[in-house]
Each structure stands twice: as C-alpha cells, then as structure tokens.
Amino acid sequence: MSFDRKASPRGLRLEWFRRHRTALSIVAHALMFALAWFLAFGLAYNFRGSPTLGWPVAWVRSLFTRVPPAEEGAFDWLTEYMLPLLVPVVAIKLSVFVLMGLHRASWRYASLRDVLAVARAAWWSFFGTFVLFYGLQYGLEYARRAGLNVAGFGEKFPDSVFVLDFAGTIALVCGARLAVRLYHEEVRPTAEGAVPKLLVVGAGDAGENVVREILRMPVLRYRVVGFLDDDETKWGSQIHGFEVLGPIREIKRVCAEHAVDEILIAIPSATRQRLRQVIELCQGTNLRFKTVPALSDLISGRATVKEIRDVDINDLLGRAPVKLDEEQIAAFIRDRVILVTGAGGSIGSEMCRQIARFQPRRLILLEQAEPGLFPIDCELRQTFKNIELLPCIGDINDRGRLHYVFSQYRPSAVFHAAAHKHVPMMEYNPGEAIKNNIRGTREVADMASQFGCEKFVLISTDKAVNPTSIMGGTKRVAEMYIQALDARSRTQFVTVRFGNVLGSSGSVIPIFREQIARGGPVTVTHPDMVRYFMTIPEAAQLVLQAASMGEGGEVFVLDMGEQVRIVDLARQMITLSGFRPDVDIKIVYTGVRPGEKLFEELAIDGENVSRTAHPKIGIWRKIPVDWDKLVPAIDQLVADADRLTREEARRRLKALVPEFQLEPPPPRNQVAAASTQVPNGAEVAPI
C-alpha cells in the first residue's frame, strides 16, 4: 500500500486548511474586529464601570491601581453600549475588508503595502461605524419625540471609542499578519548540511530585496552576517536587522572576522571592472561568489532580484549589451533563405540563434558533424516554431554536396563559420588547415557566386592579422580569395574579424574549468600572454550588424575592448571556484607553443582601420589582390596540402601572404622544459 503526502496527518491538515482558507480568514478577521471593539470600550472606560466583567478584571486592576472597582448596580458599558453594537460593527468591517479583497491576502508575505491596505479598510470601517452610530442615535431621538418608548445610547457614550477602535483594528490585523510572517521567517527548518554564512556587497535596494527574499525562504539556506557598502552614510545602520559593516575595500578583513563562506554581490549596475576589483580583493581566500541579475535584465523583466546565481567569468569579461540597428538587420534577414556553414559549432550555432530572431523564411544548417548539428536543430525547432529549418549534413570540401544544397534551396545569404580554428592543432596538421580553411572557403564562395547569392559573409579571426600560425595564415588566404572574388561576382563578399570568444569549444575557459574541477594544475603558456575576448552572442550580433552594412569587399573589424592577461584570467577563475591560486590550485607555465603570439593585433582605432556608423565596427584597409596570381598559387597549395610538412606549409603561406611572419619553432630545450612542468594527462588550452 502506498502513502502520499496527503495521507499523513500533517498533509490532511494542510489540505483541509487550503480548502477552508477563505472561511478561516473571515472568521479570524471577525474575531479580531470583535476584540478591537471590546478593547476600544475597555480603554475608553479604563476597564471600569462594568459589573458584568466581574471580579477577574477588578482583581487584575487591583494589581496596578488602588482605584476601587465599580459597585453592583452601576452603569454597565459592556451590556449597554458594546454588545448591542457588536454585530453591526463587525458586519460593517467584514463587508469593507471582503470588498477590498483583504480576506484573500497572504499573511505569510505581509508587507508595508498590506499595512496601508489595512489602514484604508479600517478608515472606511470607521466611517461606516460612525455613520451607523449617529444614524441610530438621531433615529432613536426622533422616535422618542414622536412619543415612542425607546431607549437611546445616552450621553455617557464616549466618542473616543471610534478612534480607539480604528487604531485597534489596524494594530490587531497587522499584528496578526506580522506574527505569521515572523513565524515563517524565524521558525523554519535548516537545509541539510552546514548553512553558509553570507556577506552581501551592496546595501542598496537590490541588497535589501535579496536579504528579504532570503528571510522568506521556507528552508534556511543562508546565514546573513551583514552588508558592505562604500556609502559612508550607511555604515553602522541596519537593514532587516543586519549591520552595514563598512566599505567594500575591507571585504577580506570582514570575511575573516565573521568566517564568511560566500559573498553575494548585490549591485546590478556594477561594471565588469568593478566586479573584477571585488574578486581581486578576495584572492587568497576560500570564498564562493554569488550575484544578482544584471540591471538590463531587471529593467526588461527577464529576471528578478531574487534570482541569485554564481558569479561567472563572463560577468568579469563580458561587456555592456550591444546596441544593434535591428531594422537594418531585419531588412537583410527577414523572409529570406539563409545558409550557415559550421552550424553545429560554437559560433555557427549562435549565428543560427541570432538569425532566427529576425524571422528568415528558411534557415539552412550545414554541418559536417552530426553530434553538433542535432542539438542546435532541436533547440531551434523548440524555440522558433514558425521558421522552416533544414539541417544538412555535409562537408564544405564536398563540391557535389554543396552544389545540391545551393541548387535545391537557393540561399540569399551565406554565413561561413565552418573552419579549423585551433592554432597548435593546425601546426601539427597543416594540410587539413589548408584544405578546410582555404579550399573549403573557396568551394562555398564559388557556389554562392554561381547561384547568385546576394551576400557571402566570411567569419575570420584576429590571428589573420600579421599571422604567425598556419591557422591564421590560411584564414588570411581565405580573406584574400573572397576579396578578389568580390570584384568578379554579383555576390557581395565581406569578411568579419574578431578575437577569442568566451566559452567556445576547446577555448581557454572550458579547459580552465575542467582543470580546476580536477584539482589542477591550471596550465598557462606564458605569464605575459594576452588575448582579446568577446561573448559568443555579442560576436554573433556584431557579425549580423556588419553583414547588413557590407556592400562588398570589406574586411570588418570588431571592437574587442581591452586585452586580458591569460594568467589573470586563470587566477580569477580559480578564485571564483572557491580556491586559492597557487595554494589550492597551482598555475603551471608550459611555454609558448608553435605558431602562438604573446599578443594579437586587432585594434579598431589603428591607422589601418576606418570607422563605420556603428561604434564597435571598423573597416580594415583593403589590400589589392592579383587574381591571376592568387588562384594558381591556391590551386598548387591545395594540391600539395597532404604532402607538406609544417615548415614547408609555412613557407608556402609566406609566399601568398607577405605579412606572414616566419618564426623558427621553439628550441627543443624549451619544449622539453615546458613538458616537464605539466603532469601526465594535463591539457593545455589552445589560445
């Protein structure tokens, strides 16, 4: 025999309470109204002059005063005034409270709004009672003058009763609700395990709201120790009983004094730089970090303050939301057939999400790897039910497959995201980089031109600027080819360059996460290695914006912001995970790998870049390309791809790309020294 929650005694009681909630609320209010009416008379008469109350009241009064109780036969306010009016007064109050819906209000979540609502209802009840009493008074007086033998209320009726009843009604109703709320907030079970001590950074509205939500949780999950805020006027004050302990710069000391386990950054408007400062202040501690949603999400309604989450590295490296000319993008995308190559990859899948927002008539997802194509296809079908989706498995080097896709579906625009992108991997596999990044791009671009696509967008990389790697060199050759093809085709060919994207497959951040989860070490190639970073959605949005602006032949450069030292990124990620860099998790330097630079060159404000109407997009100076020399050289390079060594491939790329920098491979002793620092099985993040 199975038992559920409702079958238990407590479950049955809860179910009975839920079914009779409204009736119980009305009864409770009626009892409080009656008590308020009684107390109003008692206070007006100082609880004297009512023999009906008998000796208990007299005995209680004798404990505090020497005034003798009323004698037998004296005037009795309880039977003369209070009881005759009790039923109509309670009826008036119940009617007002029910009409205002206050009998349905949740006592557990009583707030200042409820107090104001109760005060308004009590005021209308006071008005109704006042009208009732004086209406009866004048009615009875008129009846006596007409010769009827009726009794009135007399001159001993105290007018202060109405004011006392008004105040008592508010005090009792609000007090009862507050008591229920306090019970649920103070008398509640504790979550299993140790409850972490929480320090709230930010004593503003967000911090107050978060602590209020924490106090309302049915199970105690945090023990708040206090607030920190840079506003001196708040120091020493209390919010919900918790003190503002000082400025944010003292966070490390406060955490040590109060044995804090977690820090909640409750500053929705905080910049990424401000968040990084808070994290850096806490380096060397075993703290975990929480935050509230961004201000933009709160304003738009996509999130609420109570949605506490872990601080992510994206919060520190991400930037303000991109402002897009959505009308321009919509005019480019809406009701058209769009093809995305590499649709199962990090960039390609995000391109599909962003494109789908602008309602294309048909979205074609071309991807070689089935495991990458399946999830994005399912996601888009679930999210964008009114868009025709065509998942196509195919290799960009397969001319026959490409011919079928282009001839069958006739795309208006192509976003070419398919590429081999990992620098060290391509140094070991130069032929594959040449075939995929150069030949594959050429095949797709030729098909776009042959079938009259309006626009072709090549997604490129900052590593194509003065390349030192085979990957960067092959992407630069791809750029050169489509620029040259633009002059010979009706299709508009444009390129968009950007740097590293946060969280893309195989990039530094997922590798660091895995290394930290394994307990370290975290591997960094060089202490001075720096890179540009951008979130995947921001990159995809700016690609769409640049594509909608392009007229053919441009190489667009995205504003990547400031470069980030990789070792600082590693330290911040270790700190965010609740560990101490170089203490709990070691950082190991492995040496610069073949083809890597210490820094990338992608400045939007350089002399080789002209500005556009969008502040985050520039245009790289166009370098003329000789088609008659370029195409035969590419043909020969592709034909020899499978036979080329790394050194030969680099020399051949140098012949095609004059700015390609031929660097000798690192000395063997450097590679050997680096390899001895990395434990067996440790992974080095490609950058």
Image: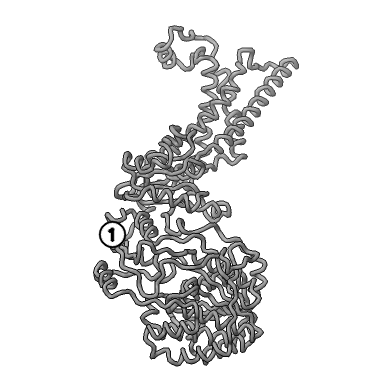
Q: Is residue 415 above or below residue 149?
A: below
Depth check: 17 or 574 in front? 574
Residue at 42% of width from left, 78% of height from top? 662
Q: Describe residue 629's horizontal placement relative to residue 524 as left or right.
A: right
Q: Indicate the position of residue 661 as horizontal and vertical percent values.
A: 44, 76
Residue at 55% of width from left, 81% of height from top? 480
**Residue 542 in which image quadrant:** bottom right
Q: Describe residue 103's horizontal placement relative to residue 676 as left or right.
A: right
Count of picture labels: 1
Q: Is residue 295 above or below residue 116?
A: below
Q: Indicate the position of residue 419 as horizontal and vertical percent values.
A: 47, 79
Report the quarter where the N terminus lies.
Answer: bottom left
Residue at 51% of width from left, 53% of height from top? 294
**Residue 416 in which image quadrant:** bottom right
Q: Indicate the position of residue 36 as horizontal and vertical percent values.
A: 53, 26
Q: Is residue 612 above or below residue 72?
A: below
Amino acid type assigned to the residue bearing label 1 in the image: Lys
Q: Describe residue 449's horizontal placement relative to residue 464 as left or right.
A: right
Secondary element under disc 1, as helix, strand or loop, is loop
Depth check: 216 or 108 in front? 216
Q: Is residue 190 visible?
A: no
